[in-house]
Image (tube, rainbow, N blue to C red):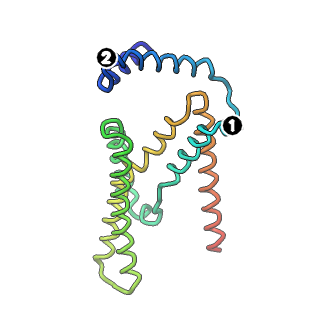
Amino acid sequence: MKDDKEKAIAVLSKIYDVARLEDEIDYLAAQAEEERHKKKDVSYLQVFKTKEIRLAFLVGAGLQMAGFESNQLALLLSLVVAAMNAAGTVLGIYLIDRCGRRKLTLSSLGGVIISLVILSAAFFFQSSGSSSGVLGWIAVVGLALYIAFFAPGMGPVPWTVNSEIYPEAYRGSGEDLEGKGLGSASNSESLLERENES
């Protein structure tokens, strides 16, 4: 704990002047101590009792639902996609604290949009009757770009932010609810797709 406090002081000293630094450290230490005393078994209903926690829940769930998946092409190129995803995630871990969450998310989102436009264009021209083999490779490039941009930013940042927006006492319950809710929504969506295919 002492090492963490020293690291925190080192980081905060880059942000605040000396006079404000001590006040900020005292405030944060008091907040941490208060959180430790307040921490108890929090029920799921208690997560929604205060406006701030409800807002944190909605923001966290919204950030997690911002992702997209392309399962058909991912199956065709599973090794390449998995390798790119792993490399992008490692890159995201490296960049998340160096670049900042907002900058990483926005740059990732921009790349995801561009790659989806490329992918959509390839599929559109393919479906409109063009039989060029180049369109298949353009689709592969679009997918590769999508994975390359999604993995370091839009993939891990929502989960990271989600773990940071709850007060410590509510963190486990809030994340658990979001994970279960999103899992249920994904399962429901896949069941509906299967029902529509039948």
Tell me residue 42's x, y (percent).
Answer: 68, 30
Seen from the viewer's position, the closer of residues 172 and 54 is 54
* Amino acid tagged 1: Lys
> What numbered label is drawn on residue 18?
2
Figure check: 99 above or below 114 = above
Mark 2: few/some/many CA within 10 Å (<14, 14-19, 20+)? few
Q: Secondary structure at mark 1?
A: loop
> What numbered label is drawn on residue 112?
none
Q: Residue at x 33, y 54 (%)?
A: 148
**Which quadrant of the structure image shows residue 191?**
bottom right
**Which quadrant of the structure image shows residue 43?**
top right
Q: Residue at x 58, y 47 (%)?
A: 58
Q: Residue at x 33, y 23 (%)?
A: 16
Q: Quadrant of the C terminus?
A: bottom right
**Which quadrant of the structure image shows residue 54?**
top right
Q: Secondary structure at mark 2?
A: helix
Q: Which residue is mark 1?
A: 49
Figure check: 139 above or below 19 = below
Tell me residue 53's x, y (percent).
Answer: 60, 38
